[in-house]
Structure formats: structure tokens, C-alpha cells
């Protein structure tokens, strides 16, 4: 089972009401939840480790996970509130305002992390959960405890506004990157992690030297590039579709990558260490395919396997 570890929240998406005024409609969201849901819909065994509230929004999150075949046995339930992300859409692109103080997800502690992860063969981590403390330290602790003998994929999805202590964040993130087998970043993320005017390939090489076997760099409308530790590079284009909004696009891309790697038997430490350019390209191609379906729909609504 792939265990997706990180935030599950409610996206409050702006929509007009019957009176004509703008209102907000609650949709399940969060980068890590979106990926878990997408993997579950694609038919691969997946679970989620997160903090979920017992409130009405937390119940909505749990129901959404179960309905998409995501195992919830590692969900940690508390009576703290649910994280809310108020989403404004302009020309299909989303901007966010978060309400995240003292929430069920954010307040997870290292001691809340499980001692045993039976039946879990791979970990997926990332999102705002790696920036918001104390849960960021909890997920770093989880990786320390369980990452050495499981495949690890990391997508930091860096949001500078969430980073209160940049030195502390960089130290934690760099350590987690070094413990990961495959890292996915946007081109903006890569420039934040490795500042400077060097070309993307040079920065990719520097990041891979820290430990990962593979790096994927997404480039918006210009597709994605994949790099292996042996210096190989592959690229995939964006699938042309009519974009409704971009909510959950990167998260669904990650789900496609994880799904293809799992189905092909590559989602192990050894498998990723020996990954070929063709296998990396195939994983990225499925990522692009499922992401294209998601952006053609309103909200983070990834496809089911029969739709691909």
C-alpha cells in the first residue's frame, strides 16, 4: 500500500448564490488528500495518514476518502477544527487564503506518528504540511522512522507565505529530500530550493547528488522534465484540453506517477534506484494524462481508472 502523509482540508470555493452574491461551497481538498483520492480512483492500494477533525467538515473528508477507496486506518481523529482554504478563481487559476490555527491536521506531533506501518510499501509526503509546525516535524519524524526500507516520493509544493522560519524549513526540507527516492518539484520550487541563475539541468544534478534517484520538474504549460541520477533526461508534454481550473493538477500528476511506478513494479527503493528513462517517461506520461482530466473539470476531481 502507498501511504499518503499530509494535509486533508476543505477548499471553500467561491460560487454565486441564488441571490447573486458570492458564496463559498465546501469541497474536500489538500494536496496530499487529492493525490490519495486520485491513486485510489486509479485502482492502486492507497491509504492516508493525516489529522482529521470530528466536526462536520472532518466527516466530509473521511467520507470522501472512503468513497475513493482510500484506507483510513492511519487517520488520526481529534476534536480540533478542520483546516479551511478559501479559494478564489481568476481565469481558471486559484489563489488561496487559509484558516489553519490549532487545527486537527496542523497540530499533529511526532509522538502521534505510528510505530508500525504494516502493509505499507511506499510513502508519499509533501504539501503545506511540511511548512506548518508542529505537523511538519511530525512528518519529518515519520520519514526518519519508516523511510529507510520503503520507497519515498516527496513533493514539497513550496508556498513561501507559509514559511515562518526559512532556515528551519530549509534544514528540514533538505534532510527530507536526501531521504527520498523520487522528488517532484515545480520549476519555481526548484529555483527556491537552489537559488541562482544556473539552468534547470544543473540544478537538477545538484539536487540528485543529495540522495534521490529521480527528480521530476513540472513546468506548467511547457510539460515536465524528468532527471535520473545517471544524468539521463526525459520530457513529456502537457495534454491539450480546455482548462476549467488548475485546482489539484499537480496532485493528480503525482498520483499518475505513483500509479504507473507501482503497477510496473518500480515503486521500491531498488526499483527506483534502477529506474530507466523509459520507465520514468511512462510514469510521467500517465501523470500528464490524469492531470489533464482534472484541469478539464471544476475543482480537484481526478478521474477513475475507467475514464483513462
Image: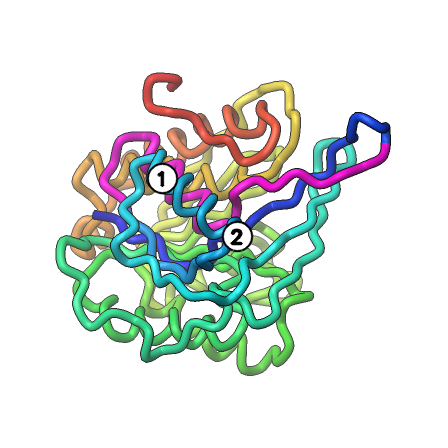
Q: Quadrant of the C terminus?
A: top left
| Contact, mark 2 vs mark 1 (Cβ under 8 Å) | no
Q: Quadrant of residue 219?
A: top right
- Residue for badge 1: 257
Residue 280 occupies quadrant: top left
Identify which residue, 63 or 208, lies in the foreground: 63
102 left or right, relative to 236: right
Say left or right for 156 vs 181.
Answer: right
**Residue closest to the eye, 32 or 166:** 32
Q: Horizontal and vertical percent for residue 42?
A: 32, 30
Give the class, few, some or many, for how many residues have Cα within 10 Å of label 2's Cα (few <14, many ≥20): many
Query: Which residue is depicted at the point 33% across and 31% down?
Result: 282
Spot occupied by residue 292 in the image (x, y as percentages of width and height): 52, 26
- Magenta span contains residue 63: no
Q: Is residue 224 visible?
A: yes
Which mark is on residue 9? 2
Circle count: 2
Measured along the vertical axis of the image, is residue 20 above or below residue 179? Answer: above
Instruction: Give the extent of the magenta segment.
Output: 21-46
Estimate the x, y position of residue 141 in percent, counting from the top left. Answer: 34, 76
Task: For label 1, count other residues whose C-alpha is less than 10 Å away and answer few (under 14), some (14-19) or many (20+).
Answer: many
Residue, x 18% and y 62% (percent of image)? 117
Q: Secondary structure at mark 2?
A: strand
Q: In front: mark 2 or mark 1?
A: 2
- Image point (72%, 47%), residue name: 95
Amino acid at each position: 500500500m502507498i501511504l499518503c502523509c499530509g494535509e486533508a482540508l476543505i477548499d471553500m470555493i467561491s460560487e454565486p448564490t441564488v441571490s447573486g452574491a458570492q458564496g463559498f461551497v465546501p469541497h474536500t481538498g489538500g494536496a496530499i488528500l487529492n493525490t490519495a483520492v486520485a491513486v485510489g480512483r486509479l485502482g492502486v492500494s492507497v491509504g492516508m495518514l493525516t489529522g482529521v477533525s470530528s466536526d462536520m467538515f472532518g466527516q466530509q473528508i473521511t467520507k470522501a476518502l472512503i468513497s475513493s477507496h482510500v484506507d483510513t486506518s492511519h487517520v488520526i481523529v481529534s476534536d480540533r477544527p478542520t483546516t479551511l482554504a478559501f479559494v478564489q478563481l481568476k481565469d481558471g487559476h486559484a489563489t488561496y487564503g487559509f484558516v489553519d490555527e490549532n487545527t486537527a491536521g496542523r497540530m499533529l506531533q511526532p509522538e502521534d506518528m505510528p510505530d508500525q506501518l504494516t502493509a505499507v510499501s511506499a510513502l508519499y509526503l509533501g504539501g503545506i504540511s511540511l511548512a506548518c509546525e508542529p505537523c511538519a516535524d511530525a512528518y519529518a519524524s515519520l520519514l526518519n522512522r519508516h523511510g529507510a526500507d520503503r520507497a519515498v516520493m516527496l513533493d514539497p509544493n513550496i508556498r513561501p507565505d507559509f514559511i515562518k522560519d526559512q532556515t528551519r524549513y530549509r534544514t528540514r526540507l533538505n534532510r527530507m529530500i536526501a531521504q527520498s527516492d523520487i522528488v517532484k518539484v515545480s520549476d519555481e520550487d526548484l529555483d527556491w530550493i537552489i537559488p541562482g541563475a544556473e539552468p534547470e539541468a544543473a540544478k537538477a544534478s545538484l539536487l540528485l547528488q543529495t540522495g534521490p534517484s529521480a527528480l521530476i520538474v513540472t513546468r506548467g504549460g511547457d510539460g515536465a522534465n524528468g532527471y535520473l541520477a545517471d544524468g539521463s533526461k526525459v520530457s513529456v508534454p502537457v495534454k491539450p484540453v480546455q482548462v476549467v481550473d488548475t485546482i489539484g493538477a499537480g496532485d493528480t500528476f503525482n498520483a499518475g506517477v505513483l500509479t504507473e511506478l507501482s503497477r510496473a513494479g518500480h515503486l521500491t527503493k531498488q526499483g527506483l534506484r534502477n529506474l530507466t528513462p523509459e520507465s520514468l517517461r511512462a510514469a510521467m506520461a500517465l501523470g500528464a494524462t490524469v492531470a489533464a482530466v482534472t484541469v478539464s473539470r471544476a475543482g480537484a476531481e481526478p478521474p477513475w481508472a475507467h475514464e483513462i
